[in-house]
Image (cartoon, rainbow, N blue to C red):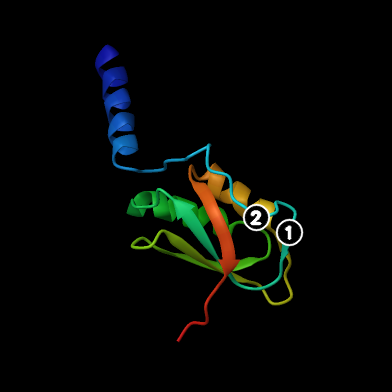
Amino acid sequence: MKILTLGAVLAAALLLASGCATTRPDTQSKDDDSRAITEDVELVVFGLSCPLCASNLDRHVANVPGVERSWIDLSTGHVQVSLEPGAEVASSDLRRAVRDAGFTLQSIRPREAQP
């Protein structure tokens, strides 16, 4: 039993050391938590580098009501979010999805047009 517990502790330590699912509670975004979002946005997320964690984050963001699709660029740590036509999403819902996935949202900004 002790070996299993030690293994779990070591695995968690390795994940944290690698930057997997890290949060920075001291970092507060300048976004208003009650802001209504009506167009596609880009989320800038702290500590996003692990493909498995990115998949988890993508799943959390995609489950926010009004989000049509999301995808992650691991090289930048940015999450692209497309909203359903006519949808309105609270920025607090996106912030909560990022936090629930184990990350810290640094900012929400308008998404640049895709080529």
Asked if residue 27 is positioned above or below residue 79 in the image, the reply reads above
Q: Position of residue 82 (x, y in %)?
A: 58, 71
Location of mark 1 (residue): 35
> How many residues crowd around disc 2 within 10 Å: few (fewer than 14), some, or many (20 or more)?
some
Name the element at disc 2. loop
Would you say 2 lies left or right of 40 here?
A: left
Q: Position of residue 20 (x, y in %)?
A: 36, 43
Is there a contact, CB below 8 Å, between mark 1 and mark 2? yes
Asked if residue 76 is positioned above or below residue 53 in the image, the reply reads below
Location of mark 2 (residue): 31
Tell me the number on the disc at residue 70. none
Q: Residue furthest top?
A: 2
Q: Nearer the viewer, residue 60 or 48?
A: 48
Q: Nearer the viewer, residue 93 or 28?
A: 28
Q: Position of residue 8 (x, y in %)?
A: 31, 26
Residue drawn at (75%, 53%), measured in percent from left and top? 34
Q: Nearer the viewer, residue 28 or 16?
A: 28
Quadrant in which the N terminus is drawn: top left
Residue drawn at (24%, 17%), measured in percent from left and top? 3
Would you say 41 lies left or right of 10 here?
A: right
> How many residues crowd around disc 1 within 10 Å: few (fewer than 14), some, or many (20 or more)?
few
Dot in front, 1 or 2: 2
Name the element at disc 1. loop
Marks counted in the figure total 2
Q: CA distance from mark 1 to mark 2?
A: 8 Å
Q: Amino acid at mark 1?
A: Arg
Q: Position of residue 77 (x, y in %)?
A: 41, 58
Quadrant in which the C terminus is drawn: bottom left
Q: Amino acid at mark 2?
A: Asp
Would you say 75 lies left or right of 84 here?
A: left
